[in-house]
Image (cartoon, rainbow, N blue to C red):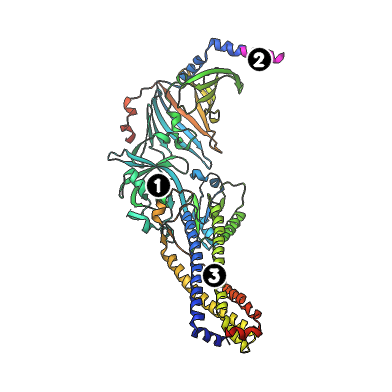
């Protein structure tokens, strides 16, 4: 029977081609829209995570209380051991130490006296470890606009805005002036190995980047770090999983008497990110839901129109002796065949497009350069994201809506009066 | 009645003493004890951090309020770091970077070596009586020793501490305890002195304790004088920028 109906559909293009194209297109649009929205939000989360928060961040309890002041004396000690523990206990994440610190950067003249000076916000990142993914996360190859990656602990990258202000370029010497972990006054000479531009508005206005070994040396922090950041291996932020891991970690490290005991902070606990995560999830559900409903109505309507268009054919089939139930069931079977075909094709097309933009992204760099955001880092390129649910979400509009539309339209079959059939067919 | 009698007695004590010695005389005597034309001292600063304490040994040369040169002697990381103050200017030299850096602007508000003292604390060069209105508030006993309590209110703008209150020992003429306040009256810093010794006819404290009251969980900073020489010969070249690099 199914083979018979399928043949009918293939031979009669008006019954198959147009509905299949419509279903394929709408399913593809639904899948891409969901994948793009999800990916776009993940891009925002990832950029904030890379620069500020990580998907998880481990600090000391005392450091958390004064986190805005970057108190180096409250940093984590024995960082390598802590990272080994984290790797063992939370293998879905990779962990990287970091030192955030502030101070002044001083550029000398030929007599080694101050030529220019500026406050600076420095980030010591683990670029040099063999298994580190920080070079990839920071996209150093893309953001360095002059010079090279730091290759030794006394080399730094300076933001293009800061370089312009201080009138320095690659190859020059810069002296950091600040305080060590023990709050002792310190000065340390660095060489500028390159100039970078994050392309994220004012975020990097006073930023320098260096390897964590350089920061440890300058700040007398051997074996210490202010933070350990954690990221999922696929770089996709799953809020529920992040909350679970954070709660689990904090339960097992709940030593209330030790202010230097570690505490884990999930991305949502940083700045305004909790509101952002909740709002994003809610917005995604609402927008996705509305979009899905609209698409379902369109396909439902298509099912109804199809039923009406075949009013005469159905009458003829009833007049020839086919039962109303048989006709109704055959229409539904046809809808299932068309719906399934459209859904499969649409899912394939939608996922292909989503995957393309997952790899290549869509750039908004120029628009975002004008924005001054500090708490939340905006990405300059949005990437879509292929997630497992995209492989079946197309069934809702593609199959369910089409079949429901056909079922509703098919109810008219039962309202047909047999005595009237020939009279209707005459006209 | 008894309370009224005690009040009258207290008043008579305060005004009786102030008749003999005005508040400005008291502060002048205090200045004479604490300051001199030339001074060379070796000291240890014990900085009680939140995690550990550090001791920095240094040698200082100073002439009046306006010229001072300090060289750190230990620990190894700090040794050779020098600081020169000339009037309202301050430079530091660090042998690690071989750079002379002027400390100015907001850097003056930073603490010295993570202690409870800021650079700005050591930058004030004017005598107290020139920059504060002085009021003798009362007498008070601390550790069974009689003290004048003097309240100081800024008469010039831009001071780090617009209000101060000092407990001055009536025998030593030294501010054994001092509280420094913001304009609003918020307590910013407390300083205490002890281990008073007589040096060349003057009383001088050999142990200071500074506490920044804004630092949470701060355990304060101790400054211990190991050796001090008053009115010794100091060459003018001691206070030159060139000496920072030598």
| Chain letter behind tag 3 | A
Looking at the rendering, the stretch of residues picked out in magenta corresponds to: B1-11
Asked which secondary structure carries label 1, the reply is loop
Asked which secondary structure carries label 3, the reply is helix
Residue A22 at x, y percent in the picture: 50, 73
Q: Which mark is residue B7?
A: 2
Residue hosting label 3: A298
Measure the alpha-carbon separation of dots 3 and 1: 49 Å
Reply yes or no: does residue B9 show up in magenta: yes
User: For the residues carrying marks 3 and 1, which lies nearer the camera in this image?
Assistant: 3
Q: Residue furthest bottom?
A: A320
Residue hosting label 1: A205
Residue A269 at x, y percent in the picture: 55, 52
Q: Quadrant of residue A291?
A: bottom right
Q: Quadrant of the C terminus of chain A?
A: bottom right
Q: Quadrant of residue A306?
A: bottom right
Measure the alpha-carbon separation of dots 3 and 2: 94 Å
Q: Which mark is residue A196?
A: none
Viewer-side residue, B11 vs B148: B11
Label 2: how many residues lie within 10 Å, few (<14), some (14-19) or many (20+)?
A: few
Viewer-side residue, B175 vs B14: B14
> In the picture provided, is B60 more to the left or to the right than A227?
left
How many numbered discs, if any?
3
The residue sitting at 51% across, 50% down in the picture is A77
Asked which secondary structure carries label 2, the reply is helix
Residue A16 at x, y percent in the picture: 51, 80
Reply yes or no: does residue B3 show up in magenta: yes
Residue contact at pointers 3 and 2, CB within 8 angstroms: no
The residue sitting at 60% across, 57% down in the picture is A248
| Chain letter behind tag 2 | B
């Amino acid at each position: 029977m199914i083979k018979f109906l399928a043949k009918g559909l293939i031979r009669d293009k008006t019954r198959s081609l147009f509905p299949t194209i419509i279903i394929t297109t709408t399913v593809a649009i639904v899948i891409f829209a969901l994948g793009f929205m999800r990916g776009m939000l993940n891009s925002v989360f990832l950029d904030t995570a890379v620069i500020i928060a990580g998907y998880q961040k481990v600090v000391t309890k005392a450091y958390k209380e004064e986190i805005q002041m970057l108190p180096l004396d409250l940093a984590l000690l024995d960082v390598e051991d802590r990272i080994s523990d984290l790797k063992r206990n939370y293998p879905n994440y990779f962990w990287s130490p970091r030192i955030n610190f502030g101070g002044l950067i001083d550029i000398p003249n030929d007599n080694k006296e101050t030529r220019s000076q500026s406050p600076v916000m420095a980030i010591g990142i683990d670029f040099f470890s063999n298994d580190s993914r920080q070079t990839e996360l920071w996209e150093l190859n893309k953001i360095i606009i002059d010079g090279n990656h730091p290759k030794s602990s006394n080399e730094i990258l300076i933001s293009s805005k800061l370089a312009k202000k201080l009138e320095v370029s690659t190859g020059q010497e810069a002296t950091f002036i600040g305080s060590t972990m023990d709050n002792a006054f310190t000065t340390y000479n660095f060489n500028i190995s390159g100039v970078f531009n994050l392309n994220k508005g004012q975020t990097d206005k006073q930023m320098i980047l260096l390897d964590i070994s350089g920061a440890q040396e300058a700040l007398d922090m051997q074996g210490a770090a202010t933070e350990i950041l954690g990221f999922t291996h696929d770089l996709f932020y799953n809020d529920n999983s992040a909350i679970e891991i954070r709660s689990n970690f904090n339960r097992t490290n709940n030593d209330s008497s030790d202010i230097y005991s570690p505490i884990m902070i999930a991305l949502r606990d940083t700045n305004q990110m909790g509101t952002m995560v909740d709002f994003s999830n809610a917005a995604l559900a609402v927008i996705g839901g509305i979009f899905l409903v609209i698409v379902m109505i369109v396909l439902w309507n298509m099912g109804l129109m199809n039923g009406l268009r075949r009013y005469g054919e159905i009458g003829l089939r009833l007049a020839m002796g086919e039962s109303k139930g048989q006709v109704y069931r055959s229409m539904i079977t046809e809808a299932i065949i068309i719906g399934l075909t459209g859904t499969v094709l649409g899912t394939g097309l939608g996922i292909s497009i989503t995957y393309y933009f997952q790899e290549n992204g869509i750039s908004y760099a120029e628009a975002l350069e004008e924005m001054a955001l500090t708490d939340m880092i905006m990405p300059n390129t949005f990437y879509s994201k292929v997630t497992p649910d995209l492989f079946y979400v197309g069934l809702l509009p593609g199959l369910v809506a089409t079949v429901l539309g056909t079922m509703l339209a098919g109810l008219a079959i039962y309202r047909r009066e047999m005595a009237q059939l020939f009279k209707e067919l005459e006209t | 009645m008894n309370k009224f009698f005690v009040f009258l007695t207290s008043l008579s004590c305060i005004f009786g003493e102030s008749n003999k010695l005005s508040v400005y005389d008291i502060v002048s005597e205090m200045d004479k004890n604490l300051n001199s034309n030339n001074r060379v001292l070796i000291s240890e600063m014990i900085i009680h951090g939140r995690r550990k304490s550090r001791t920095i040994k240094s040698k200082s040369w100073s002439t009046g309020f306006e010229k001072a040169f300090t060289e750190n002697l230990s620990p190894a990381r700090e040794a050779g770091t020098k600081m020169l103050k000339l009037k309202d200017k301050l430079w530091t030299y660090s042998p690690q970077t071989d750079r002379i850096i002027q400390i100015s602007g907001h850097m003056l508000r930073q603490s010295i070596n993570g202690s409870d003292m800021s650079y700005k604390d050591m930058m004030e060069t004017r005598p107290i009586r020139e920059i504060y209105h002085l009021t003798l508030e009362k007498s008070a006993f601390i550790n069974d020793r009689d003290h004048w309590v003097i309240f100081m209110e800024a008469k010039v703008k831009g001071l780090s501490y617009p209000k101060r209150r000092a407990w001055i020992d009536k025998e030593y003429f030294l501010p054994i305890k001092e509280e420094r306040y913001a304009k609003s009256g918020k307590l910013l810093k407390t300083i205490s002195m002890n281990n008073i010794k007589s040096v060349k006819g003057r009383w001088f404290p050999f142990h200071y304790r500074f506490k920044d009251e804004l630092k949470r969980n701060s355990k304060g900073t101790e400054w211990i004088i190991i050796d001090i020489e008053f009115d010794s010969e100091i060459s003018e070249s001691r206070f030159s920028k060139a000496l920072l690099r030598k």
